[in-house]
Amino acid sequence: MKKPKSGVWLDGILGGALWACACAAMAWTLDGASLGVGLTQQRWHEHTGTLPVTESGQGPVLMWSLQGQAGTVAGATLRWQLTGQGQQWGSDYTGFKQYPDGSTQPWQQTNDWRSAQLMAQMDAAWPIRPGWQLELSGAVQAQKQWRDLHQYREHMRQQNALWGVGLQWQATPQWRWRVQALEPLSGASGARLSAPSLGFDADIQARTSMRSLELAWQPEASSPTTGRSEWVLRWQAVRTQWGASPEVNGHVFPGAQQQQRTLTLGWVQRW
């Protein structure tokens, strides 16, 4: 494994420093957990010029989270959330097959995609009018993806530090909705792409942004129970721009654009 270039993991370093400061300064409590299932649709497009490579597919996603409070600052309620998710599906590949002599021909097949993601997020929420809250958010994300092209396999790793804004509305005691947008903290973040059978291992740049919309129903909100549970329907769109790689062992990754849209239904239990 090659040593990452200086500055490649800047987003991860900045995000980790922010979370370290938060951990040291606040009293953290755990007050909820959730589990959700859903469906992801993905489209992948490589920047290969005269030999375009595209993939599209869909498959199941499993999500879990732990959440709690971290106190108050400047009139804002601080909440934290640790979220994990896993995905796997078949992806329809349209591109080319390359032979040992360097020649190519158009090719179609079904590839296997797998991914795993872990994200830690902190939200600061200020009441702006009855039922409404304005949120500022910071997050640190780590992601791994495996892409099986049959000729060879790719392994992509990425670390992000993100920031963003959100708006939450408690429409009734039972119903609320929330919208949020997250962007990279310092532009492109560090990523790494490897294809072991090709002897390829290189640093690349990546830029990820997220948009989400949640609709939550709390069936117990109007009853005199101590516990609080809710159903959450969540739509999320994630877009990642993968940068081109340097030439390694005669191979070059041309860069790609990846778009995912995920719809999940989850059960949240708080105490």
Image: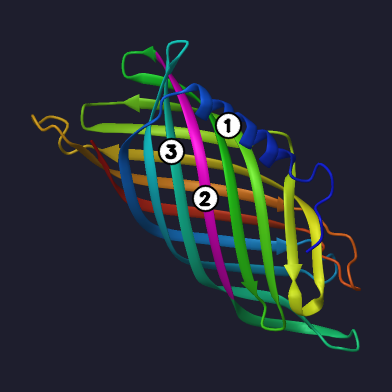
- Which residues lie in the magenta part? 112-127
In the rendered image, residue 44, in percent from the top left (x then y), is placed at: 65, 62
Q: In this figure, which residue is indicated by the disc labeled 2?
A: 118
Q: In this figure, which residue is indicated by the disc labeled 3?
A: 81
For the stretch drawn in magenta, the main secondary structure is strand
Q: Is residue 114 magenta?
A: yes
Callout 3: 10 Å neighbours few (<14), some, many (20+)?
some
Q: Nearer the viewer, residue 53 or 83?
A: 83
In the rendered image, residue 21, in percent from the top left (x then y), is placed at: 58, 26
Tell us which disc is closer to us: 3 or 1.
Answer: 1
Quadrant assignment for the C terminus: top left
For the residues bearing labels 3 and 2, Cβ distance under 8 angstroms:
no
Earlier-in-chain disc, 3 versus 1: 1
Q: In screen coordinates, is 102 left or right of 19? A: right
In the rendered image, residue 8, in percent from the top left (x then y), is placed at: 78, 46
Q: CA distance from mark 3 to mark 1?
A: 15 Å
Tell us which disc is closer to us: 1 or 2.
Answer: 1
- Quadrant position of residue 130: top left
Q: CA distance from mark 3 to mark 2?
A: 11 Å
Look at label 2 and name its amino acid.
Answer: Leu
Mark 2: secondary structure: strand
Image disc number at residue 20 = 1
In the rendered image, residue 211, in percent from the top left (x then y), is placed at: 53, 40
Look at label 3 and name its amino acid.
Answer: Gln
Mark 1: secondary structure: helix
